[in-house]
Image (cartoon, rainbow, N blue to C red):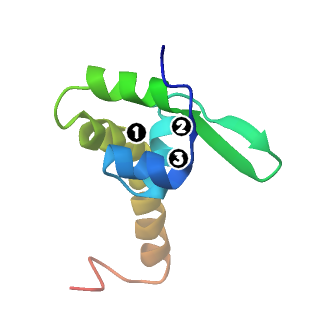
Amino acid sequence: MEDERLVGRRLVAEMLGVSAATVDRLEAAGVIPRRRRLSAARVGWLHSELVAVLRNLPEGALTARTAAARAPEARARAAKTREANAARGVVGDPAA
């Protein structure tokens, strides 16, 4: 019989070797299954579904898929920053 325990975000993050915020990004990108609502303030994932995902992911896939999922957001933030800096007359990287 499969393990039908529900596990919380912290344990999911531990299982995957990522941060809790990355768990949310992986879920949004479709890399891990959707969470299940346990109550108004609590969510969980089926342990058996997470184990199946881990078994089927190639080595290093979490890092690559997470980066790919975040790439459009990162480019949009960088473009906004460049536009804001240009509007203020800052050219190049002000931290350099």
**Label 3: few (<14), some or many (≥20) within 10 Å?**
some
Residue at (57, 48) in percent of width and height: 8
68 or 57, nearer to the observer:
57
Q: Are marks 1 and 2 in contact (CB under 8 Å)?
A: yes
Q: Residue furthest top?
A: 1
Helix, strand or loop at label 1? It is: helix
Residue 11 position (above or below residue 3): below
**Badge 2 amino acid:** Ala
Of the numbered discs 1 and 3, the one sitting upstream in the chain is 3
Query: Disc 3 marks which residue?
Result: 24
Residue at (40, 39) in percent of width and height: 69
Residue at (52, 47) in percent of width and height: 24
Alpha carbon separation for disc pair 1 and 2: 8 Å
Residue at (48, 63) in percent of width and height: 80
Label annotation for residue 28: 2
- The number of numbered badges drawn on the structure is 3
Helix, strand or loop at label 3? It is: helix
Label annotation for residue 69: 1
Viewport quadrant of the C terminus:
bottom left
Write down the quadrant of residue 67 in the picture. Answer: top left
**Badge 1 amino acid:** Ala
Write down the quadrant of residue 43 in the picture. Answer: top right
